Amino acid sequence: MSIDEIAEVVRDHGTPLLQAADDIDAVVGACATALRPHMLRVRGRGADLAARLDHLPSAVGLSRLRYGADVTISGVAPEQDEFIVVLPVAGRARFDYGRTTAALGPGAMSVVSPYRPFTLEIGRDFDQVLVRLERRQVESAAAALIGAAKATPVHFELTTAQVSPGLVGLIDAAARLAADPHVVRRTRLAVQVETLIVDALLLGYPSNLSGKLAGAAKSPSAERVSRAMDYMLANLADQPLLSDVARHCGVTLRSLQLGFRREVGMSPGEWLRNQRLERAHAQLSLASEAETTVTAVAVACGFLHLGDFAARFKQRFGESPSAVLRGSRL
């Protein structure tokens, strides 16, 4: 998986909001809808826009944008409601945020935060994948990670950090999920992927909270881990968000992860998936084909992608879910 592959998924499966568009008002309007409101100025005498914007609706909002001209982008208000993750595909750009400047190009990434004025000087060949994250989601996730009682501002540093393979993998999953017509209850699963993307960004990208996030890594007691297990088992079908589990147990998400590693040798997400697989196996073993279906059992146990469920089930138990259901009649 790579940024180029994500860009192709967005181009192939997204909605083309702009195609070689040369009207500034139309370009600004479409970009404001898919991303955030901004101002656009074309640089160079006699230069014309040739903008293309593809938008793939999902929980995180995925877009691919190329202006086809040298342009300057700037914010329309001091504060906005979105964070925009910029993943360059080709070309070069310069990003000014407050009093800091960074160069953008393939292999690096940057984050347009919502709190201060910004300017992007974009070259005509600059092609980019953009990930839109809601401000309230990022701030709430940050609060959960550091154990704060309420949402807190997150000022990501303006730096062209190398793109984390883990973050790219999560964004790739979000893109393919949004493009997959066979996903059951797509919205719920997309929200969970969004949560993982936000957490990965907070934990892996420098910000004003980096010190607190590092200090939040104190491992909880075995009793807190046991309480988390009980909570997840009681809400197995609802697929509880790990941030909610951590909040219920009075620990940070990072602490919860460390506690599970210490007590059971795996992450809380892995443990939860194993419990869901065990419950699905038990239900399929006791049911008959006249009473239920593999899909119904998968959904009841919190699995939203049937292909992934079947693959993990067979890997764990050595036979397919349908084979277990058929065998339950014997």
Image: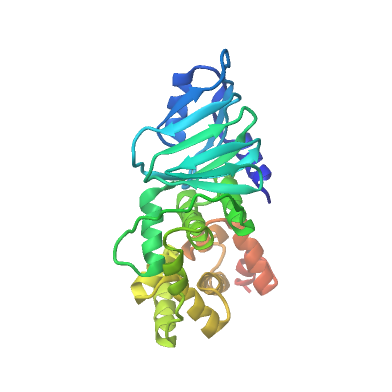
Task: Quadrant for residue 143, please give it.
Answer: bottom left
Q: Is residue 69 visible?
A: yes
Residue at the far front in the pictured view: 99
Residue at the far top in the pictured view: 46
Residue at 52% from the left image edge and 40% from the top image edge: 95
Left or right: 108 in relation to 297: right
Left or right: 99 in relation to 122: left
In the displayed structure, 44 sits above or below 6; it is above
Rendering coords of residue 109 (x, y %):
58, 48
Give the total number of marks visible in the rendering: 0
Left or right: 165 in relation to 135: right
Rendering coords of residue 71 (x, y %):
54, 26
Display colour scheme? rainbow
Residue at 66% from the left image edge and 35% from the top image edge: 91
**Quarter containing the C terminus:** bottom right
Residue at 60% from the left image edge and 62% from the top image edge: 309
Rendering coords of residue 35 (x, y %):
45, 37
Name the one closer to the observer, 92 or 228. Answer: 92
Name the one closer to the observer, 281 or 235. Answer: 235
Q: Is residue 291 visible?
A: no
Task: Quadrant for residue 66, please give it.
Answer: top right
Residue at the far left in the pictured view: 149
Task: Quadrant for residue 36, please give it.
Answer: top left
Left or right: 97 in relation to 293: left
Rendering coords of residue 27 (x, y %):
48, 24
Name the one closer to the observer, 286 or 151. Answer: 151
In the displayed structure, 259 sits above or below 211; it is below
Name the one closer to the observer, 220 or 206. Answer: 206
